[in-house]
């Protein structure tokens, strides 16, 4: 077994003697790369973000920003990362380095105040800078909506969240500025141009990313393992049913940092090819459990509208660059954002162990608080979404913040309405019971009835009564119930014209 190594800013470095639970953030800082900062240690502030070379959607390689505070450095064995220090171009002997275009714009537009968050913003901004399908829009015409501060759409189709250079501000949704310097940061983001042909990081996109490597990294009586194939991984899990399975580590990383959790054996599945497939069949869509949410979003490109509504509201871009559907379902959290959507889509999960596979409807998957039918040694291999899709869909997330927050209530709708009649209704709920649930009573009350105000007003009290909501620091039980009923009224108001036309 080759010693675990990682390429940082073009230079290879051994991971040893870091412990298997050591985060990439701590590894980098111990090597003197202190631009990477720890702010929250749970993936909410982005001060730690770095770029990782990942398999691309439109090019062989994408530069993807991730939270270094969550990813164990052992998980990056054989991979290639760039920190904020690595973005600048080194000068000739005796000459200063040349700032990266993103760094230059942040400097000249006052985007850096205390500077603590700046390296993280720069890395997230650089990931968007190098996004292959980002393209500038034509210069806007004069007239209403041309003011970029107005919040209205511009004549070139841009808005306050998308710049004329094609920059999507959602790329920075996981980065926090405690000095409230967001406007100059946005100005910098909307001012960056496109990479030149001589840009080495742009050129790097044309080559394949590092191939997955098998890892067996042992230190301090703990081991981090990655196998080449799913079959090898399942045999390992048969032998080590106590192992912690990780993909993006967006959940496990928080446990390590905030709760000081440690594991004798961690098994990574994020690079297993069998868990990274996305196929559209005649009767279903198969989504690999280890594909990141960003990869799913960009590969589907809106083909599943309900998922397309989910993605922008699921945490931040930094988290979506690591989080997976397999991980979100595997934790069994009753407030995970994807389960309500997948329940409304009538999805199923394919579970695999060393003896074979089985398919389980997601409605039968959850058995209790953070419990499921998944047996020791079993993995979620994929999620299956049946086709055809319902045309009337919506995802309503009620939370204290618009983005990058945990939901108090999440409601997903998928309805078939033909000739003004609700032929089929599926409603998934999160945050109102010990598990994600289907709103079965409300579904039954809608089906066979006209999609009309009278039907919705009669069904809304039933939806308010679904589940067993509780009082906690995010919301009261009464508020959660009220939001359920309001969500159905909102759906009707949003869709009645489209359904009637």
Image (cartoon, rainbow, N blue to C red):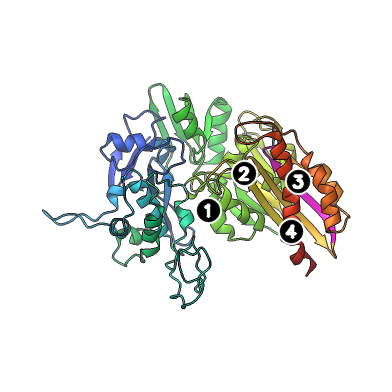
Identify which residue is drawn at 77% across, 41% down: 464
Horizontally, is 413 left or right of 130 in the view?
A: right
Going from N to C along the chain, the mark reached first, 2 or 4, is 2
Identify which residue is drawn at 85% across, 65% down: 419
Among all residues in the image, which is located at the extreme right? 448
Mark 3 sits on what residue?
485
In contact (CB < 8 Å): disc 1 and disc 3: no
Going from N to C along the chain, the mark reached first, 1 or 2, is 1
Disc number for residue 337: 2
Mark 2 vs mark 4, CA separation in Å: 23 Å
Mark 1 vs mark 2, CA separation in Å: 17 Å
| Range of magenta residues | 421-436
Mark 1 sits on what residue?
295
Going from N to C along the chain, the mark reached first, 3 or 4, is 3
Residue 411 in percent (x, y) is at 69, 46
Residue 4 in percent (x, y) is at 35, 36
Helix, strand, or loop for circle 2?
loop
Q: Is residue 10 above or below residue 264?
A: below
In contact (CB < 8 Å): disc 1 and disc 2: no
SS majority, magenta: strand
Which one is in front in this view, the residue at disc 3 or the one at disc 2? 3
Mark 4 sits on what residue?
493
Mark 4 vs mark 1, CA separation in Å: 32 Å
Q: Is residue 188 above or below residue 236?
A: below
Going from N to C along the chain, the mark reached first, 4 or 1, is 1
Helix, strand, or loop for circle 1?
helix
> Which quadrant holds the C terminus?
bottom right
> Which quadrant holds the N terminus?
top left
Horizontally, is 12 left or right of 482 in the view?
A: left
Q: How many marks?
A: 4
Helix, strand, or loop for circle 4?
helix
């Amino acid at each position: 077994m080759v010693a675990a190594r990682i390429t940082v800013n073009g230079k290879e470095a051994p991971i040893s003697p870091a412990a298997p639970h050591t985060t990439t953030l701590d590894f980098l800082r111990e090597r003197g790369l202190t631009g990477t900062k720890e702010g929250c240690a749970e993936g909410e502030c982005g001060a730690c973000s770095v770029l990782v070379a990942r398999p691309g959607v439109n090019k062989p390689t994408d530069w993807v920003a991730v939270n270094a505070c969550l990813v164990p450095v052992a998980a990056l064995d054989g991979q290639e990362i760039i920190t904020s220090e690595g973005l600048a171009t080194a000068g000739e002997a005796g000459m200063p380095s040349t700032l990266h275009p993103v760094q230059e714009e942040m400097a000249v537009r006052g985007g850096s105040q205390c500077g603590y968050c700046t390296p993280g913003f720069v890395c997230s901004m650089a990931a968007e800078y190098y996004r292959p399908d980002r393209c500038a829009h034509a210069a806007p015409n004069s007239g209403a909506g041309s003011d970029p501060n107005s919040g209205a759409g511009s004549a070139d189709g841009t808005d306050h969240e998308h710049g004329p250079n094609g920059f999507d501000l959602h790329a920075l949704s996981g980065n926090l500025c405690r000095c409230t310097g967001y406007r100059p940061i946005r100005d910098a983001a909307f001012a960056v141009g496109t990479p030149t042909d001589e840009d080495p990081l742009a050129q790097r996109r044309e080559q394949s990313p590092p191939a997955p490597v098998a890892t067996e990294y042992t230190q301090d009586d703990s081991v981090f393992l990655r196998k080449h194939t799913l079959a090898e991984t399942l045999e390992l899990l048969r032998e080590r049913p106590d192992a912690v399975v990780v993909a993006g580590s967006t959940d496990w990383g928080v446990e390590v940092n905030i709760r000081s959790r440690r594991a004798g054996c961690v098994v990574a599945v994020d690079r297993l090819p069998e868990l990274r497939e996305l196929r559209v069949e005649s009767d279903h869509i198969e989504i690999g459990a280890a594909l990141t949410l960003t990869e799913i979003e960009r590969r589907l490109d809106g083909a599943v509208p309900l998922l397309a509504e989910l993605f922008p509201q699921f945490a931040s871009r930094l988290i979506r660059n690591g989080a997976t559907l397999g991980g979100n379902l595997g934790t069994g959290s009753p407030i995970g954002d994807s389960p309500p959507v997948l329940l409304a889509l009538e999805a199923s999960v394919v579970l695999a162990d060393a003896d074979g596979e089985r398919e389980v409807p997601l409605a039968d998957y959850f058995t209790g608080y953070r419990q499921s039918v998944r047996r020791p040694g079993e993995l979620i291999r994929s999620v299956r979404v049946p086709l055809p899709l319902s045309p009337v869909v919506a995802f309503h997330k009620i939370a204290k913040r618009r983005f990058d927050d945990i939901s108090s209530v999440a409601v997903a709708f998928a309805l078939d309405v033909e000739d003004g009649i609700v032929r089929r209704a599926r409603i998934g709920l999160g945050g109102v019971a010990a598990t994600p649930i289907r709103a079965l009573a409300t579904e039954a009350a809608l089906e066979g009835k006209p999609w009309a105000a009278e039907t919705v007003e009669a069904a809304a009290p039933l939806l308010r009564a679904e589940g067993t909501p509780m009082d906690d620091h995010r919301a009261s039980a009464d508020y959660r119930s009220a939001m359920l009923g309001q969500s159905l009224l909102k759906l009707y108001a949003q869709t009645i014209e489209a359904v009637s036309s």
